[in-house]
Image: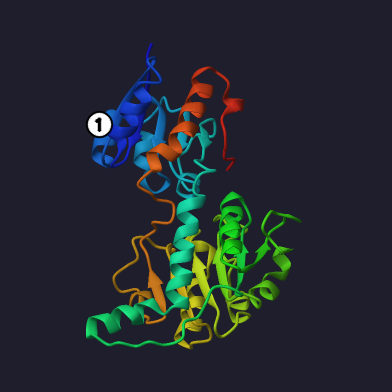
């Protein structure tokens, strides 16, 4: 009997077409939204889905589900499902987000260093203002959460002549001049010109960046969160930004997404907001495809132990 695979997302047709050429023994069912997914999912044993597009009613409608391959690094929404059967194998899509995540971090750093929102406003007003420019060279980046993405970001920071410090349980990592344990996070934050959050959202990491860590930052320091909204205590951050205790924040992720229109973050002049685009790229299908092929092949061949990035809840 043919194994059916449900793929959810705006680009589900692309994934279904490309994976279909690799797996003649699988039947791929693309769905562009929740309604289409619910219609197509009944016999599916495998689910390919982005973390934020999964929902409990879908799981309830998939009695044969055996394997979820996330199309994202994060799996916190999958972990939060109240009805996920314990025997379902879950794998994350990791190991290839370094380029886009690093470039977003640099977008934020350069925007704050060069005061780019003000530059655009002067352009709008046709104001010629030839003034000194703040450089990234010589500045200190503190990265909270040291994994593969952080290593790629650290490499790029070194090319810009920046000092790189990490906060991690690791004792060494390429590109890092020093690594601080979690207990010394405020001390590390105090050294940061840019405090960049890359830690995953877990129970232990919820509000890891709290009032103590934020208050330890330099007045000219900038907090950049490209990890998950829940890793940062947003109330503490709002207070620090309103009081101008830190220079600003570049925020790609929030505790509630989409960010509500009445959120005070929208109107803060010292905040730059992007819409959770850190892991996205025009080449995403090409980036994730080798992992999907390897993991699906391992699972279909009855070798789940060979599936990469298995997540334990």
| Rendering coords of residue 150 (x, y %) | 59, 56
| Rendering coords of residue 47 (x, y %) | 40, 32
- Asked whether the viewer can see residue 311, the reply is yes
Locate residue 179 relative to residue 263 in the image: left or right.
right
Nearer the observer, 209 or 115: 115
Residue at 42% over, 73% down: 111
Residue on which the image places disc 1: 39
Secondary element at image label 1: helix
Locate residue 242 relative to residue 165 in the image: left or right.
left
Label count reads 1
Locate residue 296 relative to residue 130 in the image: left or right.
right
Residue at 47% over, 74% down: 249
- Asked whether the viewer can see residue 43, the reply is no
Residue at 63% over, 77% down: 212
Q: Is residue 96 above or below residue 191?
A: above
Q: Quadrant of residue 142?
A: bottom right
Name of the residue lying farthest toward the right: 171
> How busy is the neighbourhood of tag 1: few (under 14 within 10 Å), some, or many (20 plus)?
few
Q: Is residue 192 above or below residue 16?
A: below
Point out the image quarter for the C terminus.
Answer: top right
Residue at 51% over, 28% down: 295
Q: Is residue 158 above or below residue 122?
A: above
| Rendering coords of residue 226 (x, y %) | 48, 61
| Rendering coords of residue 198 (x, y %) | 55, 59
Q: Quadrant of residue 45?
A: top left
Point out the image quarter for the N terminus.
Answer: top left
């Amino acid at each position: 009997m043919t194994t059916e695979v449900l793929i959810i997302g705006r680009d589900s047709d692309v994934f279904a077409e490309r994976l279909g050429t690799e797996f003649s023994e699988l039947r791929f069912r693309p769905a562009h939204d929740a309604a289409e997914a619910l219609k197509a999912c009944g016999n599916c044993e495998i689910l390919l889905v982005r973390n934020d597009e999964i929902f409990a009613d879908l799981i309830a409608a998939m009695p044969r589900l055996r394997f979820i391959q996330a199309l994202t690094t994060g799996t916190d929404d999958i972990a939060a499902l109240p009805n996920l059967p314990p025997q379902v194998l879950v794998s994350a899509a990791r190991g290839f987000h370094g380029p886009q995540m690093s470039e977003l971090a640099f977008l934020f750093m350069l925007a704050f260093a060069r005061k780019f929102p003000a530059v655009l406003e002067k352009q709008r007003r046709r104001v010629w203002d030839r003034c000194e420019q703040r450089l990234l060279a010589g500045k200190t980046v503190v990265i909270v959460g040291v994994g593969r993405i952080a290593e790629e970001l650290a490499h790029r920071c070194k090319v810009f002549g920046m000092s790189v410090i990490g906060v991690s349980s690791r004792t060494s990592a390429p590109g890092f001049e020093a690594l601080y344990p979690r207990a010394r996070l405020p001390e590390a934050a105090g050294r940061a010109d840019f405090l960049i959050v890359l830690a995953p959202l877990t129970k232990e990491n919820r509000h890891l960046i709290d009032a103590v860590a934020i208050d330890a930052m330099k007045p000219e320091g900038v907090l950049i969160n490209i990890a998950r909204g829940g890793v940062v205590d947003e109330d503490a951050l709002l207070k620090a930004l309103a009081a101008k205790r830190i220079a600003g924040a570049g925020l790609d992720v929030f505790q509630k997404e989409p960010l509500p229109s009445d959120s005070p973050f929208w109107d803060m002049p010292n905040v730059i907001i992007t819409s959770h685009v850190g892991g996205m790229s025009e080449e995403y299908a090409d980036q994730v495809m080798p992992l999907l092929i390897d993991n699906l092949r391992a699972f279909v061949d009855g070798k789940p132990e060979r599936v990469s990035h298995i997540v334990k809840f």
